[in-house]
């Protein structure tokens, strides 16, 4: 099993957000985390929030505990403070769930 979050963001500075992604990826990998899907969204047809969303992605970890350790890691927080906070103006957690098998195993 693994733990997955489906996230929606409103990215306001693509270049700085890319710096964030590049800086956090080695840290994410060290916690066993990975991105599954990643979309730039042109139009939101229905939403449960008033926050804008122009990016949707999934992020997966071996467990919920590993995810929590990652997001509280001082190295990750440093990268987030340097690049993420200035490039994203809203964050929406669309879903969180345990996964019992990966989509690859369904094909």
Image (spheres, rainbow, N blue to C red):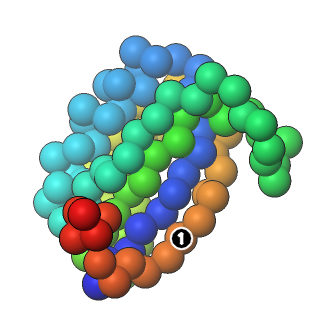
Residue found farthest to the right:
50
Identify the secondary structure beneath mark 1: strand
* Camera-nearest residue between 49 and 106: 106
Q: Is residue 5 above or below residue 16?
A: below
| Left or right of 86 on screen, residue 82 | left
**Residue 10 quadrant:** top right
Residue of label 1: 96
The vertical placement of 24 against 58, above or below, is: above
Question: Considering the image in quadrants, where does the C terminus appear?
Answer: bottom left
Residue beneath the point at 59% across and 65% down: 95
Q: Point out residue 26 in the picture as x, y percentages from the top left corner.
A: 16, 47
Looking at the image, residue 40 sits to the left or right of residue 82; the answer is right
Residue 59 lies in what quarter of the image? bottom left
| Residue 70, horizontal then vertical, whole percent | 32, 64
The residue drawn where x is 62% and y is 23% is 42
Residue 66 can be seen in this image = no
Tell me if 87 is positioned left or right of 15 in this view: right
Total numbered labels placed on residues in the image: 1
């Amino acid at each position: 099993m693994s733990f997955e979050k489906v996230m929606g963001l409103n990215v306001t500075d693509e270049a700085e957000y890319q710096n964030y992604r590049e800086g956090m990826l080695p840290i994410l990998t060290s916690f066993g985390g990975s991105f599954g899907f990643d979309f730039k969204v042109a139009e939101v047809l229905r939403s449960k929030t008033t926050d804008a969303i122009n990016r949707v992605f999934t992020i997966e970890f071996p467990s919920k505990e590993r995810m929590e350790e990652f997001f509280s890691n001082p190295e990750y927080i440093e990268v987030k403070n340097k690049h993420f906070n200035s490039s994203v103006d809203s964050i929406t957690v669309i879903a969180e769930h345990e996964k019992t098998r990966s989509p690859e195993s369904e094909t």
